[in-house]
Amino acid sequence: MARLTLHPDRLFSADPGERAIARELYASVRDLPIVSPHGHTDPAWFATDEAFPNPAELLIVPDHYVFRMLYSQGVPLEKLGVPTGDGSPVESDGREIWRRFADHYHLFRGTPSELWLNWVFVECFGIDVELDPETADHYYDRIAERLDTPAFRPRALYERFGIEVLATTEGATDELPYHRALGEDDWTGRVISTYRPDSVVDPDYEGFHDDLERLGELSGEDVTSWQGYLAAHRERRAYFREVGKATATDHGHPSAQTANLSTREAEQLFGRIVGRRAEDGDAELFRAQMLTEMARMSLDDGMVMQIHPGARRNHNRQVFQRFGRDKGADIPGPTDYVEALGPLLDEVGNEAALTIILFTLDEDSYSRELAPLAGHYPALRLGPPWWFHDSPEGMRRYRERVTETAGFYNTAGFNDDTRAFLSIPARHDVARRMDCAWLAKLVAEHRLADDAAAELAGELAYGLARRAYRL
């Protein structure tokens, strides 16, 4: 059997001088606490602290990074245990799912998923042989045995990973029962919510009108009127801050388009939307107006605003119809920021008290649009490379294209944006290594002093995210 090891110099430069500097920088940040300000783990894990059911349910079924790769090679999602929207049967035997995963593990060679998973196998479970069809059962038994112990309950892992704060993401109509339970518990872990109102600000979202009605019920506001609708958002944001200890909002719109309509124009537009009389372009205009309204609310209540446009979501209609959202079929598309954000920035871009973190799936916009915008407007910060670019090469390209214009301090550190809990420390380890490798290059080229690099290593690993998200 082939041995599985993690090389201590992985992701560092092959140049001896740069590698030595990177080692020293990494040693200074390796054990810093993890700030995870944007993610999609399940708050029920931490509220109930129940054991994870089996290796497949933990590492395969919830992770679209994993099952999208297998699906691309012809493995049906049903065979991987991914639940269907109508409840029709899928594979429920965790061992069979795991064996199928092991049969195809070679597909992940050279991908960030392999980096993350191998870290989990070695560091979390102490496995020292490579995963393949012959070792599949050994893996499954070893992981299942560990999951059955108190040391592998969610809270114990949270503490073992050195997590200082972890943010989950909930929709505007979520009543946050698990966050409420956590708030009434004496556990010292900090798990907070994030306000994600997409389902009630996007008229194209399935179930929009039903969710809008529910928003009115929860807020006690008349959401058939424009002013009542805005008041409902203010109430729900306050609820998320009180019950979920939220410090941020999150907006996953198809584009970065913003608008700044007059009150009369906004009322007329909302009337068409809520009255199911929308015209061509109304849905996009309404989303655009709501980004500006949410920015105004953030200026009032202090919540950090995150905008991550550009995903052509649910591109595979058959998969969407059978399995629902977030099944690996969201595809990046070109995204305009300079013109699109203009109305919002005219309104609030010069407000230093406001923080808007911009993400992108369109790497071409880094140096052309995003870095110049963040390098000028006080309200803007750049989020890290994420999703398809949450990778060593993606991180390197990000630093190369952003730093010379926006610097380091107009960026928001790192966030892991994952549903796969055990990948959180693995992802942060990759980010810390890549940032130290980049800083080492600047030091070796005499573009950055040693002490400045050491300070920046800590900021990139910990300080920037903590401040950007007001944690």
Image (tube, rainbow, N blue to C red):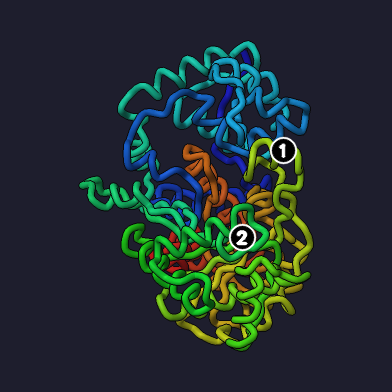
- Badge 1 amino acid: Val
Task: Between residue 165 and residue 267, name the one nearer to us.
Answer: 267
Total number of numbered labels?
2
Compared to residue 334, the image places residue 177 above or below, namely: above
Upstream in the sequence, badge 2 or badge 1? 2
- x, y (%) of residue 54? 47, 23
For the residues labelled 2 and 1, the Cα–Cα distance comes to 20 Å
Which residue is located at x 62 percent, y 17 percent? 99
* Residue 463 appears in the picture as rendered: no
Compared to residue 279, the image places residue 107 above or below, namely: above
- Badge 2 amino acid: Gly
Which disc number belongs to residue 319? 1
Q: Quadrant of residue 156?
A: top left
Q: Quadrant of the N terminus?
A: top right
Instruction: Using residue 300 as the reference point, say whether residue 388 is left or right of it.
Output: right
Label 1 environment density (alpha carbons within 10 Å; few <14, some 14–19, many ≥20): some
Circle nearer the viewer, 2 or 1:
1
Residue wearing tag 2: 252
Instruction: Using residue 302 as the reference point, say whether residue 374 is left or right of it.
Output: right
Compared to residue 102, the image places residue 400 above or below, namely: below
Q: Quadrant of residue 83?
A: top right
- x, y (%) of residue 420? 52, 39
- x, y (%) of residue 86? 61, 33
Task: Between residue 432 and residue 27, name the one nearer to us.
Answer: 432
- x, y (%) of residue 182? 29, 48
Local SS, label 1: helix
Label 2 environment density (alpha carbons within 10 Å; few <14, some 14–19, many ≥20): some
